[in-house]
Image (cartoon, rainbow, N blue to C red):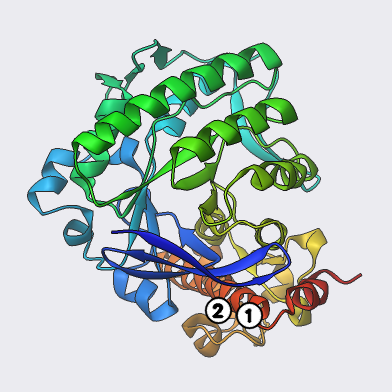
Amino acid sequence: MNQFKILHKDGKARVGILETTHGIIETPNFNPVGTQATVKALAPKDLKEIGVQMVLANTYHLMLRPSTSVIAKFGGLHKFMGWDRPIMTDSGGFQVFSLGGGMEEGASKVVTSREYRVWSIKGEKRRPRLNKITEDGVEFQSHLDGSKHILTPEKSMDLQFDLGADLTVAFDDHEYRDDKKHLMESIERTEIWAKRSLVAFKKLKSKQLMYGVIHGGTNKALRIKSAKFTNENFDAIALGGIYGTKKDMYEMIGYTLPEISEEKIRHLLGIGEIEDLFEGVVRGVDMFDCVAPTRRARNGSLYIGRKSGGNPKNNFTLNISSSKFTSDKKPIDGECQCYTCQNFSKAYLRHLYISRELLFHQLATYHNIYFITKLMEKIREAIKNNSLSRLKHAWFKP
């Protein structure tokens, strides 16, 4: 049984608890992404040591390899991956659309000038389409071996049930163009699929909690329309689809969440940079997930606080590949208490990175996940003390 309860508010920011079958989650919370039933480079014991409360796994990838039927034989994802805390799975929709419509349009996730675009069309290049959208669902080819599959709302619910996650997501149509005609078609299809997801979900008599997803791109009227529908039909709410620039995204959160009942948990899908966490929380977001901490780590981008040189312009990161760290005896962040910062210098980490040693991925990922996890703890504490605005100012002061 999943139950969300708000404990304290500081403006629109909320501290709450979500009770799940596998434990209680304190919110606001950041969920590391474990696409293939693993958070890259870390073992479950590392995640527990850090204080991670929940991880997100990907239905699309797991249905293709090793298959949900294999995972079900182990009693679900928790036993399969050796993780006894809460797990969230997505519907698989984002991947089948990003590998289909998104690929055909040459779309990708990019960050330019601190403006975050979920879909950005790059030039005239076109690649083969991997999916076909019908009213029933999505027909697609596996990116692994080209085998053909069909993913429908009912199939998505069955797959997520077999995976045994605590939190699931209704199957949705992920828009990849931000024009009104396409957005309207996408919302209509999402609403139809949401209703079918609900019917399938109820038939399974699941104890899971299911998110409905709000779409509408950067179109305010369509976002609000989608929000009202989702709020009316679901107990948990996720914001998804095209967000536009950071400014667009923050405005969208601001005018969308007032349409959501106060007692319902809100999740901002696929977002987790430091600035976004603060801006989301102050607007009432309770949950986040993103590959940023792990992907940044693997590419030598490590989180640092203000006293160690972090600021909005560098996204609170340093690039460990820089030659200036060749003989640097200091840790990544002087205030960080993680295993990496307590035991290794920037010089050693740079050596590992330049040498392409596997240990770098573990140490760097450990630090980044620890850094974000502890930041969320500080944010929760600040909300409890009615001092979130003060904490935010300390991070973003000129």
Report the residue at 71% width, 62% height from top.
Answer: 282
Q: Amino acid at mark 2?
A: Tyr
Q: Is residue 394 left or right of residue 189?
A: right
Report the residue at 33% width, 35% height from top.
Answer: 60
Q: Position of residue 62 (x, y in %)?
A: 27, 41
Residue 385 found in image quarter: bottom right
Q: Position of residue 14 (x, y in %)?
A: 61, 67
Q: Amino acid at mark 1?
A: Lys
Q: Residue furthest right?
A: 398
Q: Is residue 103 visible?
A: yes
Q: Is residue 212 left or right of residue 319?
A: left
The quarter of the image holding the N terminus is bottom left
Q: Where residue 149 is drawn, which disc sits there?
A: none
What residue is shown with label 1?
A: 384
What secondary structure is found at the residue carrying circle 2? helix
Q: Where residue 348 is drawn, which disc sits there?
A: 2
Q: Is residue 210 left or right of residue 378?
A: left
User: Where is 127 relative to 372, above or below?
Assistant: above
